[in-house]
Amino acid sequence: MNRFTTIALVALLAIAAFIVPASAQMDAIEVRSTVYNGTDAAAGVSITPADFAGFFYDIDDNIGSEMLNITTEGTTSRTIAESNLAYSTTIEQVDYAADFEAEAGTSNNGSYPVLGLFAEKYVALDDNSPDELVKLLLDSDDKYTLRTGSA
């Protein structure tokens, strides 16, 4: 009986050695985009969310406002001059997922202003100015109870 227990224990340890926990496996993340070498475009390159997966893009609302412009005119090397690289983003209106009553005296009652900034979605507190930005807390037509201290 003792020998059977020892053999069973060794067999279990051998099986356990080949089992790798899911948390120990490394997932590779790959961001694909067009490769530019500087000779492809004489005037410059404009990179948008359609070209580069590293920019914010909302597939449901077709919103992606980030753009990277590289001016290659007059460049003789693979180095981009500081004045030849410009990142820009613009405010776009997104419809609320939930139905709200119209608020008197405000514009865009059925939508709110969003913009992508370095691949993240932000909400502008003013419809026309990105001076103050916040992360979107909730945009859903489900019912929620928000309590103090809840995340």
Image: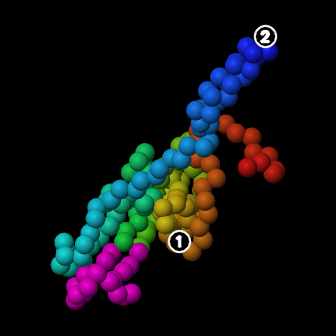
- Hey, what amino acid is under mark 1? Pro
- Furthest-right residue in this view: 148
Question: What residue is rendered at 59% in x and 36% in y?
Answer: 20
In the image, taking residue 149 as reference, residue 109 lies left or right, namely left
Count of labels shown?
2
Q: Which residues are magenta?
A: 69-87
Question: What residue is rendered at 77% in x and 48% in y?
Answer: 150
Q: Earlier in the sequence, mark 1 or mark 2?
A: 2
Horizontal and vertical percent for residue 77? 26, 85
Residue 136 can be seen in this image = yes
Q: Quadrant of residue 2?
A: top right
Horizontal and vertical percent for residue 144? 70, 39
Question: What residue is rendered at 20% in x and 79% in y?
Answer: 43
Mark 1–mark 2 Cα distance, whole angstroms, equals 76 Å
Residue marked by disc 2 = 1
In the image, taking residue 9 as reference, residue 53 lies left or right, namely left
The reply to whether dot 1 and dot 2 touch (C-beta < 8 Å) is: no
Residue marked by disc 1 = 130
* Secondary structure state at the residue bearing disc 1: loop
